[in-house]
Image (tube, grey):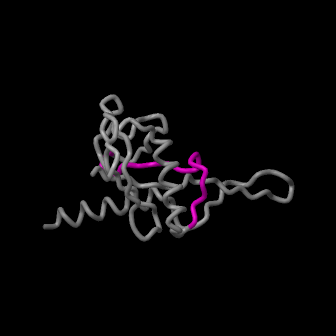
Amino acid sequence: MLLYKPKKNQAGKGNRILISITVLGSAGPIRFVVNEEELVADVIDTALKSYAREGRLPVLGSDFSNFVLYCPTAGTEALSPWETIGALGVRNFMLFKKSSPVKNATEDGKQSPMVRKGAGSWKAWFNKSVSRKIVSHAAY
């Protein structure tokens, strides 16, 4: 007796891979299977939907254009939304919300210089955490 339907051959669709996406401030990574040829924008959208479905905190929202995906082992540049997720050959990523500048208007109507909220940007945090690891390993 057959308990499941066999899937059709997916030879033309590429390989499926398990990826792990870490969201800054969340309890742990989100893991799901994607096609290697899926666009980064689609992967971000899937990650946000999965994150919301699991009821994770902090609440992120659902607009994938407000987020960028980084690969910690491939440098500090964000992945292009039109790039395929399998292009780098890595499986671990970090999801960050794009920083939005906050501007304050002065009394005469002119814009004052940008004011940032918090002690620093996520890039500074990322570079600082990477440099700590390198320094701590070099000491041995």
Up/down of 119 relative to 95, above or below: below
Coordinates of residue 101 in the picture (x, y in percent): 64, 53
- Residue at image position (48%, 59%) is 122
Q: Is residue 108 left or right of residue 50?
A: right
- Residue at image position (40%, 56%) is 21
Coordinates of residue 104 in the picture (x, y in percent): 74, 58
Q: Is residue 70 magenta?
A: yes
Q: 106 or 68: which is nearer to us? A: 68
The image quarter containing residue 123 is bottom left
Q: 111 or 129: which is nearer to us? A: 129
Residue stretch rendered in magenta on the structure: 59-74
Up/down of 10 relative to 48, above or below: above
Q: Is residue 96 magenta?
A: no
Instruction: Tally the marks.
Output: 0
- Residue farthest along the left direction in this orientation: 140
Of the 4 image quadrants, the one containing the C terminus is: bottom left
- Residue farthest along the right direction in this orientation: 108
Coordinates of residue 43 in the picture (x, y in percent): 46, 46
Q: Is residue 13 left or right of residue 61?
A: left
Q: Is residue 81 left or right of residue 100?
A: left
Q: 108 or 9: which is nearer to us? A: 9
Up/down of 14 relative to 136, above or below: above
- Residue farthest along the top direction in this orientation: 12
The image quarter containing residue 102 is bottom right
Q: Is residue 54 left or right of residue 6?
A: right
- Residue at image position (17%, 62%) is 138
- Residue at image position (26%, 63%) is 133
Coordinates of residue 59 in the picture (x, y in percent): 58, 65
- Residue farthest along the front direction in this orientation: 1
